Image: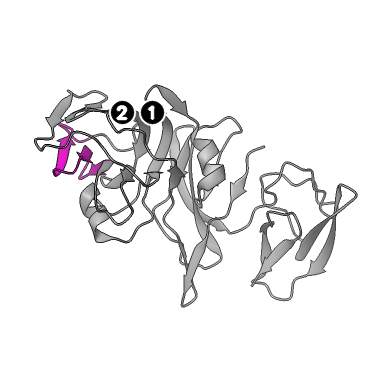
């Protein structure tokens, strides 16, 4: 069963803003060489695809892949200044694109599906890539100006990641989404491997952005900050059916509380006090469902 998790939010004057969505994994092992192969779909001409630096301050060595004014840009800095490899032509929006970024010592190569390869070289004395921080996909959790200057863009990816391969090793993005990420994720089907990232906010504090692909059509909309379950256990809710990935049908205006007794989950009800109250997702420990008002 696929699940939906609720990301952390920041509230200011009654508004709710989703923290920048991103995936985080262990740093790239690219001291001498690396090959990054990634497939994605973007709906904006600017966005971060990948970043790994020596630190989140932006100082030191780094490697990045981004969309800048419609072009794919692959950059790396070995300590002697950044090297920029830029695709010959803009990529098509709303189209699946495959990018391969390779580096061996001072030499780099960028391959974009349907375009000629681009090569570049670092002309300094340094030849090794010294990375100390995590590798980030789709965005970078840093407010340091130097980070965005290194990458060349400030905004995160508005689109979907389909696959990632590092040095011939396939990376299951879903594993990192569930373990490390604070993003809003919705796997449309149980076996869907792509992850989609929204780049907009909902004006209503009780709504959050949801995005995904369905039959190759991108969708982004606002939904209630609530799902019925974040567990594979079966939860029966006051004869309204079994909890799954859909919203609980609650025509009687009741809120449900779930608790565990002898490994069996039961539910009780409580009348809403105000129309603005609604169900929130189960807590990680399955203690109870929370009410937001």
Which residue is painted at 22% across and 41% down in the image?
70
Colour treatment of the image: one colour
Left-right relation of 287 to 94 = right
* Mark 2 and mark 1: Cα distance apart in space: 7 Å
Which residue is painted at 49% across and 32% down in the image?
215
Q: Nearer the viewer, mark 2 or mark 1?
A: 2
Disc 2 on helix, strand or loop?
strand
Which residue is painted at 90% across and 49% down in the image?
262
Q: Which stretch did the figure color magenta?
A: 64-90
Question: Furthest-left residue in view?
Answer: 123
Within the image, what quadrant is residue 23 found in? top left
Q: Nearer the viewer, residue 198 or 151?
A: 151
Q: Nearer the viewer, residue 244 or 58?
A: 58
Disc 1 on helix, strand or loop?
strand
| Horizontal and vertical percent position of residue 274 | 69, 75
Q: Residue tagged by mark 1? A: 166
Specify few, some or many for label 1: CA neighbours under 10 Å numbering under 14, 14-19, or 20 or more.
some
Quadrant holding the C terminus: bottom right
Is 103 contained in the magenta span?
A: no
Question: Furthest-right residue in view?
Answer: 262
Q: Residue tagged by mark 2? A: 34
In this rendering, the answer to whether 195 lies above or below 106 is: below
Q: Are marks 2 and 1 in contact (CB under 8 Å)?
A: yes
Is 81 contained in the magenta span?
A: yes
Which residue is painted at 33% across and 54% down in the image?
56
Question: Furthest-bottom residue in view?
Answer: 13
| Horizontal and vertical percent position of residue 196 | 45, 42
Q: Nearer the viewer, residue 139 or 258?
A: 139
**Residue 93 visible, this angle:** yes
| Horizontal and vertical percent position of residue 244 | 71, 44
Quadrant holding the N terminus: top right
Q: Earlier in the sequence, mark 2 or mark 1?
A: 2
């Amino acid at each position: 069963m696929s699940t939906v998790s609720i990301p952390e939010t920041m509230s200011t004057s009654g508004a709710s803003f989703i923290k920048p969505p991103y995936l985080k994994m262990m740093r790239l092992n690219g001291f001498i060489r690396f090959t990054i192969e990634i497939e994605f779909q973007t709906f904006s001409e600017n966005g971060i695809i990948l970043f790994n630096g020596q630190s989140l301050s932006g100082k030191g060595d780094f490697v990045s892949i981004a969309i800048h004014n419609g072009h794919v840009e692959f950059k790396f800095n070995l300590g002697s200044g950044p090297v920029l490899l830029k695709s010959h032509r803009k990529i098509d929006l709303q189209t699946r694109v495959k990018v391969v970024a390779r580096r061996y010592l001072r030499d780099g190569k960028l391959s974009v599906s349907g375009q000629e390869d681009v090569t570049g070289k670092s002309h300094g004395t340094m030849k090794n890539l010294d990375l100390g921080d995590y590798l980030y996909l789709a965005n970078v959790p840093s407010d340091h100006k130097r980070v965005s200057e290194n990458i060349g863009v400030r905004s995160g990816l508005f689109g979907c990641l389909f696959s990632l391969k590092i040095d011939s090793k396939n990376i299951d993005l879903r594993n990192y989404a569930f373990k490390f990420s604070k993003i809003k994720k919705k796997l449309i089907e149980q076996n869907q491997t792509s992850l989609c990232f929204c780049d907009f906010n909902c004006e209503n504090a009780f709504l959050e952005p949801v995005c995904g692909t369905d039959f190759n059509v991108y969708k982004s909309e606002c939904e209630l900050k609530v799902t019925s379950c974040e567990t594979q256990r079966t939860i029966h809710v006051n004869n309204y059916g079994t909890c799954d990935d859909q919203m609980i049908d609650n025509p009687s205006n009741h809120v449900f509380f779930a608790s565990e007794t002898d490994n069996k989950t039961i539910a009780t009800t409580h009348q809403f006090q105000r129309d603005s109250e609604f169900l929130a997702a189960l807590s990680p420990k399955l203690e109870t469902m929370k009410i937001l008002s």
